[in-house]
Image (spheres, rainbow, N blue to C red):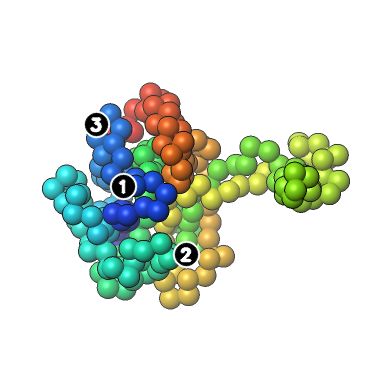
Amino acid sequence: MKVAAFVPARKNSKRIKHKNRLKINNQLCLQKVVNNIQRSQVADTIFISTDDEYFFNKINGAKFLERGSNFSDDFSTVIDLLSWHQREHLMEYDFILHLYPHSICIDPDTIHNAINQFKKSQSLRMISVAKLPSPIEWTFKLHDNILISNHPGAELIRSQDLEDNYYNTGQFYIYKKEWFSSKDLENKTGYIIDRFQGVDVDEEPDIDLLKQCYDYYSKRIKDLC
């Protein structure tokens, strides 16, 4: 069964200019992600979907897919983009492993183990998840500086008496070919990673957090590129 790795890296970013060109230790984060995929030895081919010519002579070990202009605005979703590429360019692949340029804390063993776990699963989609640091029953909404409990009365329940809950870290997704026929978002399983392996880079402070997390994991995971 053939596996394609897929990394979207568009040129423009609404909140952080050229965030996909971010470097750590003088190396593009995108190259670090490609290197980690290569070391996992799970992908037959690594593809980068981009409209940014900046990457063309700077990234090794991957093939480029031209990202259509209709997928380079702030309105199209990554699933829209991936579905189009799957239909137009990736139909021969049985699995698609999707990571982001900021997924630099996802090490080769994590990628390898996630793919193997997913191949044994009946689900058509896998997402990376991490455990919430506190019970979801202890969460609130804030209206006019007043906290409103999402689960009234649950603060009286001990945390050890509540079930663990998990959130989507946005670091990687894996799809079976069949998923693209239905695009059923509820047909999924999860692969648990450490909370700080997943940093979603949306604001400038997120870049500093990503660098700190990468520094932490690079000292503890010997194969992390």
For marks 2 and 1, the one nearer the N-term is 1
Res. 39 in view: no
Left or right, residue 100 beside residue 34? right
Q: CA distance from mark 3 to mark 2?
A: 37 Å
Q: In the rendered structure, which amino acid carries the disc numbered 3?
A: Asn
- Please, what secondary structure does the residue beneath circle 1 have? loop
Query: Disc 2 marks which residue?
Result: 124
Residue 145 sits in which quadrant?
top right
- Amino acid at pointer 2: Leu
From the image, tell me which residue sits under label 3: 26
Alpha carbon separation for disc pair 3 and 1: 16 Å
Query: Vertically, is 66 above or below 105?
Result: below
Across and down, in percent, residue 2 comes to: 29, 61
Badge 1 is on which residue? 18
Of the two numbered discs 3 and 2 in the rendering, the one whose residue sits closer to the viewer:
3
Mark 1, other Cα within 10 Å: few <14 / some 14–19 / many ≥20: some
Camera-nearest label, 3 or 1: 1
Q: Residue at x 74, y 50 (%)?
A: 143
Q: Tell me which residue sits at (31%, 47%) in the image.
A: 18
Mark 3 falls on what kind of element? loop
Local crowd at mark 2 within 10 Å, few (<14), some, or many (≥20)? many
Q: Looking at the image, is mark 3 or mark 2 earlier in the sequence?
A: 3
Q: Nearer the viewer, mark 2 or mark 1?
A: 1
Q: Position of residue 35 (x, y in %)?
A: 26, 41
Residue 84 locus on image (x, y percent): 33, 71
